[in-house]
Amino acid sequence: MTAPSAARSREDDLGVLPEWNLGDLYPAIDAPEIEADLRSSQARATAFAARWRGTLAAAAAQGGASGLAEAVVEFEAIEELLGRLVSFAGLVYSADTSSPAHAKFYGDIQARVTDISSALLFFPLELNRIDDAAMDACIAADPALARYRPWLVDLRLDKPYQLEDRVEELFHEKSVTGHGAWNRLFDETMTSLRFEVDGETLALEETLNLLQDPDRERRRKGAEALAAVFSANLRTFTLLTNTLAKDKEISDRWRGFADVADSRHLANRVEREVVDALASAVADAYPSISHRYYKLKARWLGLETLEFYDRNAPLPGASRRVIPWEEARAIVISAYRGFAPDMAEIADRFFTERWIDAGVRPGKAPGAFAHPTVPSAHPYVLLNYLGKPRDVMTLAHELGHGVHQVLAAPQGALMASTPLTLAETASVFGEMLTFRSLLEAAKDTAERKMLLASKVEDMINTVIRQIAFYLFERELHLERRRGELTAERIGEIWVEVQGRSLGSSVHLGPGYESFWSYVPHFVHSPFYVYAYAFGDCLVNSLYAVYQNAEAGFGEKYFAMLEAGGTKHHSELLAPFGLDASDPAFWHKGLSVISGFIDELEAMD
């Protein structure tokens, strides 16, 4: 645990950090409303199955009189109720994963919701067995069903990979004791880890934060502490990784997915060719972006080469001032307001209505996220705010997600959710607005240089690093098909792939081979990570459109966010004249990053 005096000092610098109020979902984990909603959803799901199972094809044959709209509306209502329960449990758990009571509550809710939702599994499966012509006729004849056309059409994309009902039910029920249990083991292991640095006992987030310390010796000690603890736990992480990769391979084989990442591409509603073009463009840009930048940074720091723990070190002359919470709020809200007052108004509600949990606490989930919960409620944001400039950008990022989720909510529980590739658009756009606002306010060349360098580092972490993560996952999952991987072999793949992306100016020394083990996306959401690079490159192109033709951009942008999951990326980007299937699109986005590095070189 952090020394009390250090913790108090940090709190004094940061001001009062908010804790979220989850009362808009449920008053407490023992609230009677929770049991009431569990029983209500169980009864409704049972009645729904009794009414509709085995009848949908016959109902569709009746065209406009099918009653399918009534079924979809009730299905959505039950899904929303279950979503509220599981969202609340997940948020309670993430606020303190070390609490046995919270862990039990989370596990119990997950298990009961899984049991209840098993009764609903038949519905999308049977809908997909209805003949296309019959479904089209029903939609044309019934305006209430036509509202759900995007969801019904989208559902069809899953059809080739669906299994018979009983197998789907088995997969669904065993998820709690399968990948769900391994996910929970990872989370509870990570939050329980403690790292000894100079007599202090730190949690993961605080120790990772040392890698941004201006004192190189502190960075080295932080890296050594991380490596020591990760290495001591490699047996657990290696078993976990092998098991989840095999679990995914079994599911993919049964469903008929050819490539290790195809199930993610399907979930993201993006074509494999588009992701391949993105990954290829980014890998081709390693020399002109990351290799070039880290060579510059090594020179700025007076080093021949950077050690891996120097990668995110502050630059000489960078401000060490801690940014208080209220100042961070003002910076982000002001940047949002400069783009659109409506956007700032939505973002500010997260502060005034206590939708944010910002402090660093023992047991709290590391990192940051925005959770949409359900359309009848609102999103919540989790941060681990330590007052660094990068933390301000994280706030801008997560509020971008939050604004997007608020705007998409009217689409309803079945259509509000956006594929990950486009879900990262609003968040990265929020970061870009904040960065540009700070850049315009820069007082001199030195401040401009610091801002540009910080932005380039963030972009490298978002684009280069995330594609390297994706390529690491690809190699790991492909090799797992041939048998288990040892911790040593996983470390070899990790160092090799990261080395290619970072270049010869970054030395990946002893200990770094274990740093794959703490990345939660590898466990929770295999192949998720390319969505960040997709979002960043997309926003770079989008921002160029905004700068070149501001009139009407705001309306188009809001319409894109309000669409939620009702449109394909090609439809959403068309109004801006952008096409993600064109390789030039990715090169255009990457050229923004290399352009910033050009400017930094010119300043040097």
Image (cartoon, rainbow, N blue to C red):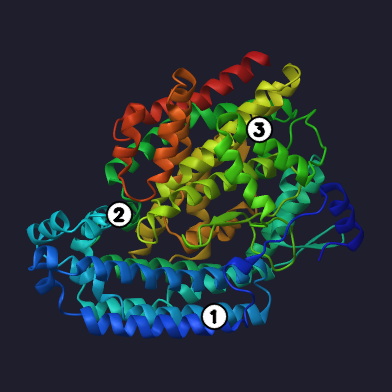
Q: Which residue is mark 1?
A: 34
215 up-or-down from 119: above or below: above
Q: Percent position (x, y) of residue 119?
A: 31, 81
Crowding at dot 1, Cα within 10 Å, few <14 / some 14-19 / many 20+, comes out as: some
Q: Position of residue 491 (x, y in %)?
A: 53, 56
Crowding at label 3, few (<14), some or many (≥20) Cα neighbours within 10 Å? some
Q: Mark 1 or mark 3, which has the lower sequence index?
A: 1
For marks 2 and 1, the one nearer the N-term is 1
Could you tell me how far apart the alpha carbons at marks 2 and 1 are, in whole angstroms? 34 Å
Residue type, numbered disc 1:
Ile
Q: Which residue is at the far right?
A: 5
Q: Which residue is disc 2 drawn over?
A: 266
Amino acid, disc 3: Ser
Label 3 sits on a secondary structure element that is: helix
Q: Position of residue 530 (x, y in %)?
A: 43, 46
Say which residue appears at 50% left-offset and 84% top-offset. 36
* Residue 8 in view in this figure: yes
- Residue under numbered circle 3: 454
